[in-house]
Image: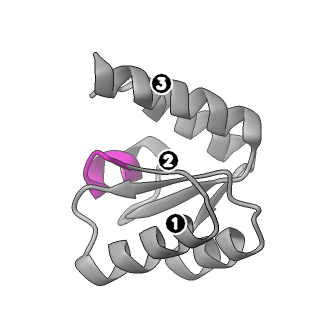
Amino acid sequence: MSKDYLNLLGLALRAGKLTLGEEAIIRDIQKRKAKLVLLASDTGTQTRKKITDKCTYYQIPFFVVDDRETISQAIGKSGRVAIAILDSGFAAKMTSLLDESIRG
């Protein structure tokens, strides 16, 4: 998987366009503030189901990406398993980078 999206993740955090924490992410999905959700590949079963079900219901795209350590390191905060992107520009660029790495 291409690591370009990790750089963009750090940039989005500095721009204040990310939501961290399961409850805050679910709240942003329900309010339709979240434009894209990233889940760590090693997210627990219950957390993964809760977030993916919400994303599916509210039609918010999501990707399962690297493990929690990799995405936590990209944003400089430990133990993060899910991240919501609140800006449509960041979400569009992130989607294109992740689509590219999946196909490539």
**Residue labelled with disc 1:** 56
Q: Nearer the viewer, residue 21 or 25?
A: 25
Place residue 15 in its image quadrant.
Answer: top right
Q: Is residue 46 above or below residue 37?
A: below
Q: Is residue 41 above or below residue 74?
A: below
Q: Secondary structure at mark 2?
A: helix
Q: Amino acid at mark 2?
A: Ile
Q: Position of residue 61 (x, y in %)?
A: 54, 51
Residue at 67%, 51% in the rendered image: 35
Q: Nearer the viewer, residue 15 or 102?
A: 102
Q: Amino acid at mark 1?
A: Thr
Which quadrant of the rendered structure holds the C terminus? top left
Marks 3 & 1, CB-CB < 8 Å contact = no
18 horizontally vs 76: left or right = right
| The label number, if any, that marks residue 97 in the structure image | 3
Q: Is residue 65 magenta?
A: yes
Residue depth check, mark 3 versus mark 1: number of the one nearer the observer: 1
> Marks 3/1: CA distance?
21 Å
Q: Secondary structure at mark 1?
A: helix
**Residue labelled with disc 2:** 75
Q: Amino acid at mark 3?
A: Leu
Q: Is residue 41 above or below residue 104?
A: below
Q: Earlier in the sequence, mark 2 or mark 1?
A: 1
63 horizontally vs 2: left or right = right
Marks 2 & 1, CB-CB < 8 Å contact = no
Q: Earlier in the sequence, mark 3 or mark 1?
A: 1
Magenta residues, start to end: 64-72
Q: Position of residue 8 (x, y in %)?
A: 56, 31
Residue at 47%, 50% in the rendered image: 76
Q: Earlier in the sequence, mark 2 or mark 3?
A: 2
